[in-house]
Image: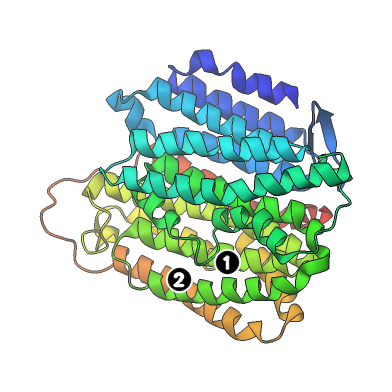
Amino acid sequence: MMMYLFGLVFLIPVCGEFWVFSLGLLLLSFMFMLSSNLSYFVGHISWMLGLDLLSYTLVLLSFWICYLMVLASEKIYKLGNFYKLFNLVILALMLSLFLTFSAMNLFIFYLFFEVSLIPTLLLILGWGYQPERLEAGLYLLFYTMVFSLPMMVIIFSIYFCEGTLMIFGLNFQFSEVLSFFCMNMVFFVKIPMFFTHLWLPKAHVEAPISGSMILAGVMLKLGGYGLLRFMKLFMKINFMNFYIILISLFGGFLVSLICLRQSDIKSLIAYSSVAHMGLALAGIMTMTLWGFYGSLILMIGHGLCSSGLFCLANISYERVGSRSLYLNKGMINVIPSFSFWWFVLLACNMAAPPSLNLLGEICLLNSVVSYNSLTMIFLMLLSFFSAAYSLFLYAYTQHGMLSGGFYSFYSGCLREYLLIFLHWLPLNLLVLKGDFLFNF
């Protein structure tokens, strides 16, 4: 454990060397991958930190996405836009995410859960595009901070009752509905659940490409991770779960309809994240093994797929200078090679085989329908409209007449192809070894 922490710390001196820094992150990713802990038990224990399968997969996802963030942000390096500070912020973010996912103490988890907000906020405020990024930053900050304070009160009450805050030693059971919402509301905001999702589209639209990638790829997974870890404390009041499942699925359906009316590419992809994570939340709330497996697999699949889609949106934005669907028409005429990657990633987004999203959604359909057969209606609508807005985005951006006013285009460079390929490869390759995620 400490080896990876020191590895991240020792990358600080090379923050000024763009490619050395990115290769260092890639090396750390592979080292962490090779030290796999694919068992139910907690391993790599040191200094209140430990990894089981759930922590391991999400830390590995964080390492991978952080490397791809650096790869996607070469423009910051070329323009000299405070790229040393940018690399330092990415390191701080990676460090806080690593400590959040591997914390075995409830208070340390809470501490770094909140600390991870600061580098994300700095990315949006420092390297965002429009002046509205200040408003987006405030939305992100206040939504998270307001709902996290009740959680701190609950943590102290657990300590007074149990005398310990070690996550794996907690046998405490809550019996009040208020405690359920005080503890879990911050996770509902983070995942985000419908009604608490308003900060997400704003943050995505104003964030730079690196901010969008880490938000979609890892930050939303903090909510799912927290719920998976602490749902065992609420076994006595699991009657609340049915209402959360209904809100998640109905909200996912409504958000899918909103996606069909978007004119901004990033906004559409951001709303699609709300729909997908609503399904993952419903799976967690069933409190069944199938639901837990499915939500974990879908979180990993969505993290890679959504991050890749934001990269493609940014590639179009760098050429056209706009994220509008109306101006990004007919891209197949000028950059046909990226049209293939749009199709492949949007196919993964609507859970086409052989993506991880399909495996996750099969598990989730199994768990949610067996929990209550009424949910089948919303699941059918959610699946249908998920395919509808994915095909709508592909058809609108790639086909049609090229918008006037463009006089020169450059096709993709090797870095961009590598960036998209490194999103797609694990998303479709991990299906071949999907059984390792069922050891959780």
Question: Is mark 1 in CB contact (under 8 Å) with mark 2?
Answer: yes
Tell which of 17 and 10 is nearer to you.
10
Question: In the image, 271: left or right of 55?
Answer: left
Does residue 333 lie above or below 44 as drawn?
below
- The residue sitting at 64% across, 52% down in the picture is 429
- The residue sitting at 43% across, 55% down in the picture is 199
Which mark, residue 255?
A: 2
Tell which of 439 and 375 is nearer to you.
375
Q: Amino acid at mark 2?
A: Val
Does residue 243 lie above or below 157 as drawn?
below
Which mark, residue 278?
A: 1
Residue 375 coordinates in the image, percent (x, y): 65, 82
- The residue sitting at 83% across, 53% down in the picture is 439
Tell which of 405 and 58 is nearer to you.
58
**Which one is earlier in the sequence, the residue at label 1 or at label 2?**
2
Question: In the image, 124: left or right of 27?
Answer: left
In the rendered image, is residue 426 in sight?
no
Residue found farthest to the top: 13
